[in-house]
Amino acid sequence: MLSQASVAMVRATLPVVRAHAVEITGEFYSSMFSAHPDLLDLFNQGNQADGRQKLALASAVVGFAECLTADTGDEAASFERVAERIAHKHVSLGVRAEQYPVVGHHLLTAVGTVLGAAVTPEVFAAWHEVYWLLACRLIAAEARLYQRGDLDPADHWRRWRVAKRLDEAVDVVSFTLVPDDGAAVPHFVPGQYVSVMVGLPGGRRQPRQYSLSHGPGRGSLRITVRRVRGREGAPDGAVSNHLHDHVTEDECLLLGPPAGETTLDTGDGPVLLVSAGIGITPMAAILDHLARVQPTRRIVLAHADRSPAHHALRRECAQTVTGLGEAGELYWYESDHDDRSRPGRMEVDALPLRPGTTAYLCGPLPFMQGIRAGLIRRGLPAARIRYEIFGPGMLERDRPPAGT
């Protein structure tokens, strides 16, 4: 709990901090990377370049402060979902508790740099308390995840050998991976992802997170990677293009442990899997798993894409659905619309909603926002809609009132 003196101070200064939050986080990253260049390897530099990481951090810190100073529990419940997502992302990257003081020092220094004389000792102390309450919450959550998975963050990255490489669709390739040392494949839950660390030209290393695209119990992990091509002046995706152009069978990749909170439930109710583009990957894992352990469960796979040729894992998923008695599939393609650069516009009213349905969403953020809003309008409770977000971002109801 935030002390009463700090509650009053944070409430009084929240408007100015919120107004300058992105400027503060921009200053924070600049100063921290200058002092600790080794941390560049831990952060997605693509998200740094386009500003998404700054916005995500600003939203998280401000949202947590609002949670601490709110009069009701709604904000706290909303932030819990955000905090869980952050903790899983951190565990997938091997974030350690001892790194939090470094972050705290540079973040609070950035507040003083941007706001200047407005940051009195009392203001600094109040926001110092906010940061450390957030840090302790995340450190505890991450410690539980490390303990649950019997993981050591100091020995985080493991070598995995590419046992199979397969072109799946236009600009999409799958890598089936096995431990290079012959160790057991770790347990994971359908819907989770792994971090992949690659070496890039110039000596840089960069991590990216990719959903696992087949279910557990196959003696391997599989990631399915879309080549990110730069548009409107944006650069090509450094890691995805490296994987496509340079990683072949029998080469090794560095992987972190499986992580992620958007996973298949343990019930037996109807399942609606909704995806667009490369968002098909966690849905393919869920479908694969259900086909083997709950083949009588009612399942609908709904997917939107640019064309059948761009639709990754299409044949595999179709074969799986055909083998199930209570499953169906719905597809939308851009060829039915004028905009040739986006997936087909999924018709949310065409999605079947049986009583007790749980929906899983994955795809571009605007796509998920639209589908989620439509499902809620049709009566599906928000608590029964789950989703995965690639990169820093939040859906509207999960954004603290005002990522990583």
Image: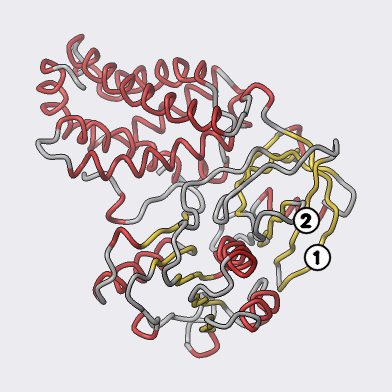
The residue under the point 65% across, 44% down is: 187
Q: Tell me: residue 386, above or below residue 104.
A: below
Q: Secondary structure at mark 1?
A: strand
How crowded pointer 1 is (Cα within 10 Å; few <14, some 14-19, many 20+) is rated as few
The x, y position of residue 347, in whole percent, is: 39, 83
**Residue that sits furthest to the right in the current view:** 250
Q: Secondary structure at mark 2?
A: strand
**Number of the front mark, 1 or 2:** 2
How crowded pointer 2 is (Cα within 10 Å; few <14, some 14-19, many 20+) is rated as many
The x, y position of residue 70, in whole percent, is: 14, 35
In the image, 393: left or right of 97?
left
Number of residue marks: 2
Q: Tell me: residue 27, above or below residue 321.
A: above
Q: Which residue is mark 1?
A: 166
Asked whether the beta carbons under mark 1 and mark 2 sit within 8 Å of each other, the answer is: yes
Q: Which residue is mark 2?
A: 176
The x, y position of residue 98, in whole percent, is: 51, 16
Colour scheme in use: secondary structure
**Residue that sits furthest to the bottom in the current view:** 336
On the image, which quarter does residue 205 sit in?
Answer: top right
Q: Tell me: residue 242, above or below residue 15.
A: below
The foreground one among 389 and 171 is 389
The x, y position of residue 48, in whole percent, is: 51, 40
The residue under the point 48% across, 70% down is: 273
Q: Which numbered tag is attached to residue 124?
A: none
Q: Amino acid at mark 2?
A: Thr
The residue under the point 61% across, 60% down is: 230
In the image, 207: left or right of 218?
left
Q: Amino acid at mark 1?
A: Leu
Quadrant where the N terminus lies?
top left
